[in-house]
Image (cartoon, grey):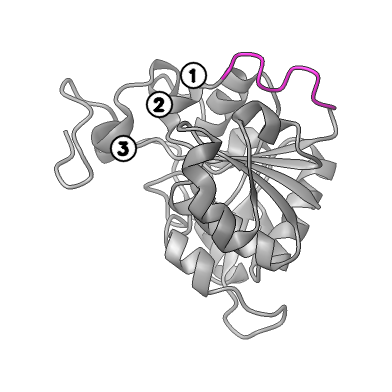
Amino acid sequence: MKIGIIGTGQIGGTLTRRLTKLGHEVFVANSRGPASLVDLAKETGAKPVTAREAARAGELVVVTIPEAKIPNLPKDLFAGVPDDVVVIDTGNYYPRERDGRIEGIEAGITESRWVATQLGRPVVKAFNNIYAQHLHERGRPAGSPGRVALPVAGDDPHAKEIVIRLVNQLGFDAIDAGGLDESWRQQPGTPVYTTDFDADGVRRALAEASQERTPKWKATSTSPGSFARPA
């Protein structure tokens, strides 16, 4: 499959490495431009491109940049991109550590619904609840005891099925977590976040989640700080 990846942070870089090893053709972009991606390209065989080119690379696009940077993407990023191209959002809202206050999310819209609104494009939420190192190291063959499971939320059943297949290729059980408005169940602060549960554990954690965002995950008057010293 031809896959565009926009963002080369921990999750974006990990997906680039894992997906190229699986034989996918990966086109990767970041905010610093293709010239900054020469080393990653040499390591993985991925092709460095611009964000617009990554959005037009093929069948699937992964948007994996800080939440606060989403509005900085080109407004026409997906203009002319066919409707059947699937867009994955891996993002999380860290108001006290990195992103500052985002009014729509503070008002109650789910993180990925907000992203979809900013992009003008439906998204599937996935890969947001696992540490990048675990995404790199803990994939296992289907049927392995204790295989880590990942939730996948989205409104389009066909798009979600494509993402579910990709998650399984990467070595994880994929759990249908419902529509995008249910994706709050896998946001930071919920029982499934960074827990590496198996399939039954993920289902239980999603069911036990509370929609109320606790103070730890809300902006303050001095947001943002840093991950070492949250505001």
In which quadrant of the rendered view does residue 20 lie?
Answer: bottom right
CB under 8 Å between callouts 1 and 2? yes
Q: Using the image, determine if residue 12 lies above or below residue 6.
A: below
* 146 relative position to 104: left or right: right
Task: Considering the whole magenta stretch, tell me its main secondary structure.
Answer: loop
CA gap, disc 2 and disc 3: 15 Å
**Percent position (x, y) of residue 204?**
54, 62
Q: Residues within 10 Å of mark 2 (few under 14, many from 20)?
A: some
Q: Residues within 10 Å of mark 1 (few under 14, many from 20)?
A: few
* 61 relative position to 29: left or right: right
Task: Write down the residue under mark 1.
Answer: 71
**Percent position (x, y) of residue 48?**
61, 43
Q: Secondary structure beneath disc 2?
A: helix
In which quadrant of the rendered view does residue 62 lie?
Answer: top right
Q: Residues within 10 Å of mark 3 (few under 14, many from 20)?
A: some
Tell me which segment is drawn in magenta.
74-82
> Viewer-proximal residue, 82 or 46?
46
Dot 2 or dot 3, earlier in sequence:
2
Residue 58: in magenta span: no
* 226 relative position to 114: left or right: left
Task: Write down the residue under mark 2.
Answer: 68
Residue type at tag 1: Pro
**Percent position (x, y) of residue 140?**
63, 78
- Which residue sits at x=54%, y=22%? 73
Residue 78: in magenta span: yes
Task: Write down the residue under mark 3.
Answer: 217
Q: Secondary structure beneath disc 1?
A: helix
